Amino acid sequence: MKHTFADAIETDLQKSVERPTSWELRALYREADEKARATATRKGLWIAVLSYLGYSVTDFLMIPDVAMQTAVMRLLVSVLSLAVLEILVASKVHARWLDRTSATALVVAYAAWLVPALHTTHAESLSYYMIFGAIFMMGANLFFNFPFLLSIVSSGAILLSFLASLLFFFPTDSAYAFGFTTFYLSCFVFTSYVNWKLNVERYHVFLNAHEAKLRQTEANERGAALLRMSNTDYLTGLDNRRAVDQRLRTYWNEWQGEGRGFAAMLVDVDFFKKYNDGYGHIQGDHCLITVANTIREAVEPHGGSIGRYGGEEFIVLARVSSRADVATLAEKIRGTVESLGVPHVERRDGTAIVTVSVGAAFTRDHIGTKLEKIIHEADRALYSAKAHGRNCARVFDPNDPHTSDESENIAALLKLAITQGLVSMVYQPLVDLKTGRQDASEALMRLKTLDGDNISPTLFIPIAERTGIILELGKWAVRTVCREMLATNQADVVSVNVSPIQLRTPGFAASIAAILGETGISGNRLAFEITEGLDMEIHSDVLRCISDLKMLGIRIWLDDFGTGFAGLSWLRLIDFDTVKIDRSFLHDIDTERGRIMLGDIVDLVRHRGPNILVEGVENEEQLQCLRDMNIDFAQGYHVGRPVPAARSAGATRLLSR
């Protein structure tokens, strides 16, 4: 089987940026901030030249007899140095040549001043004025950011020039020669040491900055990998629902602003649950990957893109110019998947291969201004395709009654359900078969229309999940249960059904914790039922959410055990507090085979340790059978029917044995 997108992302996340060697670091240091170094050196030499020329005034005060010569030499050296500097800058040479030019200019400037100055007759003034040379030495070591070796060479040349001048001008004054030699040597050693320290510090700053840059690069690459993960389906590598929604919004805005039409197509793998039941989860994943790649290859030549919209549902977005083009592309998608010939013998509709149903919608003048509209229309077209036997493609037609199911009206009703009081809770008691007490209940949601008609949960719950309204309904349900039943102590424990959408939603556990804190209810009085019959992937987000819920004390129950393909996997991964065995197994106990099957399932669950609850008890014979099997809890119309909280308060809490 091919590697999943999650494997590729995990590899990216484990990668680290390669660190350079010490030699490579030195080379990088020399090349770093080339432009900044060149600018600093250029600016520094200009300042030094101006200062050098300004000191000509001092020459006229200290050594007036040769001041004109020194001033001329200062001017010549300054002009020459700046000319060479600007030529090099214009030539865009490496910064090290600007450093060498500046160092040479310092040495030449000192010598150019010193040679005419030594011919003065004002020996005493010059003897004090000789300290001026230390400024050049400090300039070489401290003013410019020269490399250490260049600083040593240039400041050493200035030192040697001074020592040579002592032999020429003060050959007999040993005290003066000793004192000023000591001073110059001290300046040389001190400024050289400081220059070395500065260079070391600059290198350390570079190393820290370079390491920070590498870490930032690693962080950016990791962030990019995480961003890809957040926008990509972990299994197929397609865009996930989040990324699809972003692209859909872009298409919609261009349609609204520029009139660029597009089509949205929902593609559903027919009887995929039966495929998983028959071939297993691994083969089911492989089937989805194969179908996804096939659809991608079919739509990309048309400029289309594909994303995973749900468990076995994909969405295709494509820019098309007519309804006929939409129909052609939808049929191409269907036919391409059918031509794969992937075996699917578990389906019972006369087709033995994997096929897809396609529902498409196309932007048109009267589609409205809401983005969700085109998805609703594609969904209604998909519903029509399934109603016509699956393995077919349908394009939404507002004039076709076959594409106008009531899901859109129910979706609109659900948006008003909480604020208009259209949704309510009823509670069905659970009996403890060891004590006969009814200390627990299951909360069940009910919905009415504005006219007061009841809508079946089997109809409105899937619509709520598809539209995302289930998130608000779910929080409302938990808050209502806490206030109606738990805060009033009408039951010790109440179970609430949770949707896979809720478990996969970031922050779900935190929102439940907030509700518990708001209502003052302990988490161990609340149970969440997970239905294994639903096509819910077992991945880290769901498991992490369940772990967080258990930390709040909330009990986790497995509902409808035995009806889905993932039940054993759930039992292996999660320590359930209670497992509810589906009613179908209890209703088969009239036969010997059915009774044995129920016993086998009970033994399997009992070995795992959780409590066992069997639902669907409709008569005393079934209840007695459960007692004989030492079942922990029972639920059904024979035990108690669902009633509102007010009537639940008056219900009996003890079941006669």
Image: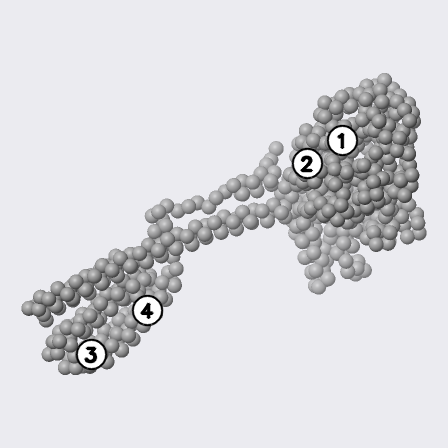
What number is the disc on residue 59? 3
The residue most toward the left is: 172
Q: Callout 4, which amino acid?
A: Gly
User: Dot 2: few (<14), some (14–19), or many (≥20) neighbours within 10 Å?
Assistant: few
Q: Earlier in the sequence, mark 2 or mark 3?
A: 3
User: In the rendered structure, are the residues bearing label 2 and label 1 in contact, judged by CB atoms less than 8 Å apart?
Assistant: no
Find the distance from the CA under tag 3 to the CA under tag 1. Answer: 101 Å
SS of the residue at dot 3?
helix
Q: Callout 1, which amino acid?
A: Thr
SS of the residue at dot 2?
loop
Kindly identify which residue carries mark 1: 578
Find the distance from the CA under tag 4 to the CA under tag 1. Answer: 80 Å
Q: In which quarter of the image is the C terminus?
A: top right
Q: Callout 3, which amino acid?
A: Asp
User: In the rendered structure, are the residues bearing label 3 and label 1 in contact, judged by CB atoms less than 8 Å apart?
Assistant: no
Q: Earlier in the sequence, mark 4 or mark 2?
A: 4
Kindly identify which residue carries mark 4: 44
Q: Position of residue 512 (x, y in %)?
A: 73, 45
Q: Where is residue 451 in the image (x, y as percent from the top left)?
A: 93, 52
Identify the residue shown where x is 31% and y is 72%. 47
Answer above or below: position of 151 versus 532. below
SS of the residue at dot 1?
strand
As rendered, which of 595 and 379 lies closer to the eye? 595
Q: Where is residue 655 in the image (x, y as percent from the top left)?
A: 89, 29
